[in-house]
Amino acid sequence: MTTAPNSAILDPVTNPVLTVAPQSKEDTTMSGATNKITALYCRLSQEDARLGESLSIENQKAILLEYAKKNYFPNPVFFVDDGYSGTNYDRPGFQSMLVEIEAGRVGIVITKDLSRLGRNSALTGLYTNFTFPQYGVRYIAINDNYDTIDPNSVNNDFAGIKNWFNEFYARDTSRKIRAVQKAKGERGVPLTVNVPYGYVKDPENPKHWLVDLEAAAVVKRIFSMCMEGRGPTQIANQLWEDKVLTPTAYKLSHGRSTNAPAPEDPYRWDKRAVSLILERREYTGCTVNFKTYTNSIWDKKRHLNPVENQAIFPDTHERIIDDDVFEKVQEIRNQRHRMTRTGKSSIFSGMVYCADCGSKMQYGSSNNRDFSQDFFDCSLHKKNGSKCKGHFIRVKVLEGRVLNHIQQVTDYILCHEDYFRKVMEEQLRVESTEKLTVLKKQLARNEKRIADLKRLFMKIYEDNASGKLSDERFDMMSQSYDAEQKQLEEDVLSIQQEIEVQEQQIENIEKFVQKAHKYVHIEELTPYALRELVSAIYVDAPDKSSGKRVQHIHIKYDGLGYIPLDELEAKEKA
């Protein structure tokens, strides 16, 4: 059975075996001009292949060639689409045949039956009734007794009905396949055919994935470089410089099949390949189904499914990337990292905010390219000085302050871990309770309003149907209600996600403590350490009232928020 789509055009000049033996003059006269080819078109979809040998490409070829010989049709040439659905005509073999037809080089097209030409009744009718006659092409479907040379044939009259049945078959098959796939996907069976780079199929269970240690090390490195602030292009260039095989080249080097052709440069990584790796939640050990969808059997374009419509099953295979690292990488990729004119960016880019207006702090450098003069300042102040004060701070000062605070926090946890847990649990419990109360009230209001909008829509629909409400008024009101309902539903989803985050706050303490132990006695602030420990930094405006420039920063730690270090130390001493 064929599993990979392929197509072939067999030229009678280069493939003389498939050329019918020269005919007599009488035969030539009967079959028409001999300078044109007879296109023998074969198609087999993956679904058709399951039905057995009767539809196989070889069987179709034998039938078509025998028919062409029997009827003295000249210059037979095969056009083949193996593994392609008949629901659309974007097939290599068919398109190649169409090029020959439009060039005037085809006299006759023959298929085993109408369904081999296609299963889209509208397009099949368009080709048989308009395109082929327009270019003087005779079309024959052998098993359906269809021949355009006799337009008055009863069999030709039934062709439209047969095309409709062929389309119905395709629709019915598609529905059944979708139902099977849906059932599998909802059970947690991986629907993806291609195992993600970094995994291999378990020889004892193809539906289970095992970690490929060599490729997994590259995946970890890619996530690590992203945590350090590097973008997909920078990561791709680094892998290329280090002569790391691309996913396709790696699979081919290990004798594994892949749909992609062998790359010209096996080390030339593409930024898109890096982005796809960084976006794959499967690396956290879960199965993700229904990530994409198609609108119909005619539309083969894959559309991204919102996360809430995907089916995610945790712990189905060994993880390569931790959950918190994966989530942090998604945050980093959603941030814009501004570079200076010199092409330099800061490890703090996207993390520093103005403590007064909440705007992001903008990264900049001096004209003399002295990196010690790099700085951050309030972006709103730079746009309009009257709306916010200046919050200028040198990067070197910021780096020293943050490193010092992290050192103090990690040292405190090392010495007073139990007390730290106790105080932070109480703080998070109070904060979470307050936030949950507000969020749940907002959720209830939104859900009530959505229900009200549904009732209002039904009412204006009935009023419009009874003539109490004009069509123009109905259109205006329905569009307004629909827009409001969509916005509310988006807000509901966001609130529900925030509620889940708040309910998991206590778990964040344990995660943070484990990370803090990794960085005890930290001497240098690396991009990875910064991203793993810190979520945001807020900078106060400098205070010069004492005659000295005094400026405070406030560090929001990942999963915990602000850590009141001074209060913790004071209570501990008391």
Image: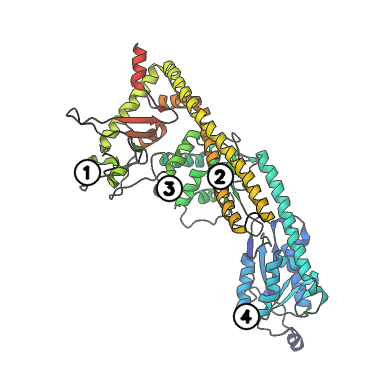
Counting other residues with Cα less than 10 Å from the Cα at mark 2, is it few (<14), some (14-19), or many (20 or more)? some
Secondary structure beneath label 4: loop
- Say which residue label 3 marks: 232
Secondary structure beneath label 3: helix
Q: CA distance from mark 2 to mark 4?
A: 46 Å
Which tag, 2 or 4, sits closer to the chain's start? 4
Q: The residue under label 3 is which amino acid type? A: Pro
Which tag, 3 or 4, sits closer to the chain's start? 4
Tell me: 273 left or right of 95.
left
Q: Quadrant of residue 476?
A: bottom right
Q: The residue under label 1 is which amino acid type? A: Asp
Secondary structure beneath label 2: loop
In this view, the residue farthest toward the front is 468
Q: The residue under label 2 is which amino acid type? A: Pro
Res. 104 mark: 4
What residue sits 47% from the left and 58% below the top? 264
Q: Point out the image quarter for the N terminus.
A: bottom right
Q: The residue under label 4 is which amino acid type? A: Gly
User: Percent x, y for residue 96?
Assistant: 61, 70
Mark in the foreground, 1 or 4: 1
What residue sits 70% from the left and 73% below the top? 128
- Say which residue label 1 marks: 370
Residues at marks 2 and 4 touching, judged by CB atoms closer than 8 Å:
no
